[in-house]
Image (tube, rainbow, N blue to C red):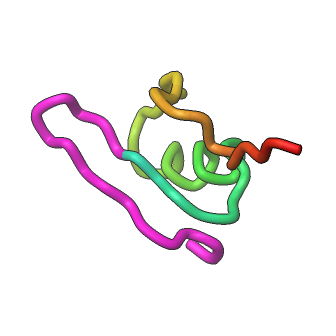
Amino acid sequence: MKGVTSFNIDFEAKKVTIVGEVTPLQVLASVSKVKSAQFWTSDISAAPTTKS
């Protein structure tokens, strides 16, 4: 998928983690074409934080 820079598959947890410049809805729509999928909450913030 265009915009994905990396991914990790955890077969035991049945979880795929996607990293890149894509929207969650794009990823969900793509994955849902071949497998039942749902969102999980992120353990870390996806956006970098900056202090001024």
Rendered location of residue 12, percent (x, y): 10, 33
The residue under the point 52% across, 50% down is 33
Task: Tally the marks.
Answer: 0
Residue 44 visible in the current orientation = yes
- Left or right of 31? Residue 11 is left
Please determine whether, in this image, residue 30 is positioned above or below residue 49: below
Rendered location of residue 47, percent (x, y): 70, 45
The residue under the point 69% across, 52% down is 26
Q: Residue furthest bottom?
A: 2
| Rendered image quadrant of residue 16 | top left
**What quarter of the picture does the N terminus occupy?**
bottom right
Rendered location of residue 52, percent (x, y): 89, 44
Residue 2 part of the magenta-drawn span? yes
Residue 17 part of the magenta-drawn span? no
Nearer to the camera, 31 or 20: 20
Residue 38 visible in the current orientation = no
Please determine whether, in this image, residue 8 is positioned above or below residue 16: below
Nearer to the camera, 49 or 36: 49
The residue under the point 30% across, 36% down is 15
What span is in magenta? 1-16
Q: Residue furthest right?
A: 52
Q: Residue furthest top?
A: 41
